[in-house]
Image (cartoon, rainbow, N blue to C red):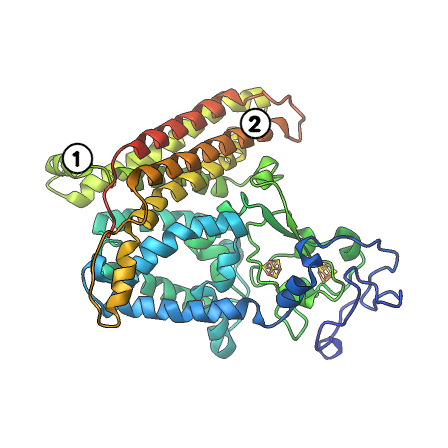
Amino acid sequence: MRISRETRPTSPPTVHPNGVSPNGVAHPLGVAAAVAPVSRGLLDNRHLLAFARSRLWPAILAYPTLVVFGYILVALLVGPGAASANLGTGLTWVLWWPLIPLAMFATGRLWCAICPFGTLIDLVQRVAGLGRPVPPFLKKYGIWIIDATFLGITWADHAFGIVESPRGSGYLLGLLVTASVVSAVVFERRAWCRYLCFLGGLSGNYSRASGLQLRATPEICRSCTVQYCYKGNGNVAGCPIFEVPRAMTSMANCNLCANCIKSCPNGSIRLLWRKPTSELWFIAKPKLSEAFLAVAIVGIVLVQNITMLSFWEPLMATLGGWLFGSRVAAFTAVFLVAMALPFGLVLAAARYSHGERRERLFENFARFGYAVIPLDLAGHLAHNLFHLLAESGTLVYNAIGLVGVYTTGPAGVLPTPTIQALQFGLLALGIGGSLFTAWKIAGRTPSGFGPARGLIPHIVVLALFGAVNVYLFTLPMAHRV
Ligand code: SF4
Ligand code: SF4
C-alpha cells in the first residue's frame, strides 16, 4: 500500500515500542498485533529514546560543530602562517584528526551525523537542492573514487606539506566544502557522504569494527507497508545515507542520525551493543573496493610514520638527488613503494590461500582484506596519539593567545615513555583483533571449509604488518606542529 503525502501522519503516532498500541490494538500501519515484545537495547532507556526522537539530536552538536568549523576555516586561511601558532591547524590536525578514529571505534559513523560538511549539505538542500537521483555510475564506483581521493590527499599532503601549512589545509578544506556543496545542489540526500567523501569511506570501514549497531526488528518490519524509515514521513526526512534499516547488516553507512528512530511508526529500530570487530567476521558480499581501502590504510600509516622519523629528511635528500633534485618525485617514489608493499603482500597471501579455499583470487583478497581493519584502526590511533598527547599543549597556548595573553610551555601533556606504552598497548589490541578476525573469516565461509583452510598465509602477512608497526613506534618521532 502506498500512502500519499496527504495521508501521512504529521508526527510519529504514540505506540508501544513494538508497534502495538497500549490498548493492545494493532497499529494501523501494517504491523501484526501478535509481535512479542523485543528489547530495543539502549533505546529501552526512555530518556535516550526521547532524546533520539527529539529535534535536539543531532542539531545540538551539529550546529556548534559547524560554527567551530567556520572558525577553523577562517583561521587557516587568514590566521598566522606558522602551523605552530595557528589554532586552526592545531584544532584540525592535533585534536580532531587524532580523535576521529577513536570516535569511529566507539560510536561508529556518528561523527557523520554532526559533521560540518553534512550539516552544510542539509542547509544548502533546503534552499537550492535539485534532488536528482544518484547516477548508477556513482553508486557502483563511488567507493573507488573515495579510495583514489584518500590516496591523492595523502600524497598531496606530503608532497606539498599541506598539514604543515595553514593555508594548504585551508585550501584543502575549501575544496572539500565546494565539492560537498555542488553534490548537495545536484543530488538528493547526502550523496556526498555515501559515495564521495573520503572521510565517509574511512569511517565506513572503521565503523565495521565498532561495538555499536543499529538494527530494525525483522518481525515488525516484515508486515510494515510504509517504510518511512527509508522514505521519510513528511515530517522527518528519510535516511540521509540511503540505508534501508530493515535490510541493514552493516554499520558502514549508518551515521546514527536517528531519522529512522523518529519516523518509524512501529518502534522497530533498536540500538545494540555487539562484540567489537564482529561485523568483520562474516561479510556476506565482500567488496574489493572496501578491502582495497583497508589495505591502502596500512600503506598510509606506514608513510605517515616514516615521514616523522629522523632518517626521513636525509632519505629525501638522497632520493631527490637521484630524481632530478625533485622532492615531489622523491616522495612519490617512496609513496608508491609504501602503497605497493601491503597490496603485494596481501595479494601474495591470497595467491596461496584462494586455491585451498576454492575461491577466486580477488574474492579471497576482498574477504581477508577486512581483517586488516583492526590493525588499521590501531595504527592510525597509535600514530595520532603521539600528536594528541605530545603536541596538544600548543593548542592551549594558541587558544589563550586569542584573548591577548601570550604564553608558552611544554607541548606534551604526557611523557614520551607513557605515550609509547599506550601506543604499544593499542597496537597489541589491533594485532590481536586482526589475527582473530582472520581466524573468524577463515572459519565462516558459505562453503563451510574448516577454520584453518587458507588462513596461514594471511596470518603471516598480518603478523608482518604488526611487527613493522611495532618497530616503527620504537623510533623517535618528529612533531607535526
Ligand atoms: S523500520 Fe522501517 S520498515 Fe521497519 S517498521 Fe519501521 S518504518 Fe517500517
Ligand atoms: S539507518 Fe537510521 S540512523 Fe542510520 S543513517 Fe539511516 S536514518 Fe540515520
Ligand 1 sits in quadrant:
bottom right
Q: Is residue 275 left or right of residue 299?
A: right
Quarter-of-image position of residue 279: top right
User: In the picture shown, does residue 204 fall above or below 288?
Assistant: below
The answer to whether mark 2 is within 8 Å of ligand 2 is no
Other residues around mark 1 within 10 Å, as few (<14) / some (14–19) / many (≥20):
some
Find residue 317 and report its horizontal and vertical position in percent.
12, 38
Residue at x 58%, y 20% (from the top left corner): 452
Residue at x 67%, y 63% (from the top left corner): 49
User: In the picture shown, does residue 124 fall above or below 115?
Assistant: below
Question: Regarding mark 2 in the picture, which secondary structure is present there?
Answer: helix
Find residue 91 and report its horizontal and vertical position in percent.
33, 60
Residue identifier under label 1: 315
Q: Amino acid at mark 2?
A: Trp
Residue identifier under label 2: 439
Task: Pick whichever, 50 or 195, lies toward us.
Answer: 50
Find residue 79 and report its horizontal and vertical position in percent.
22, 68
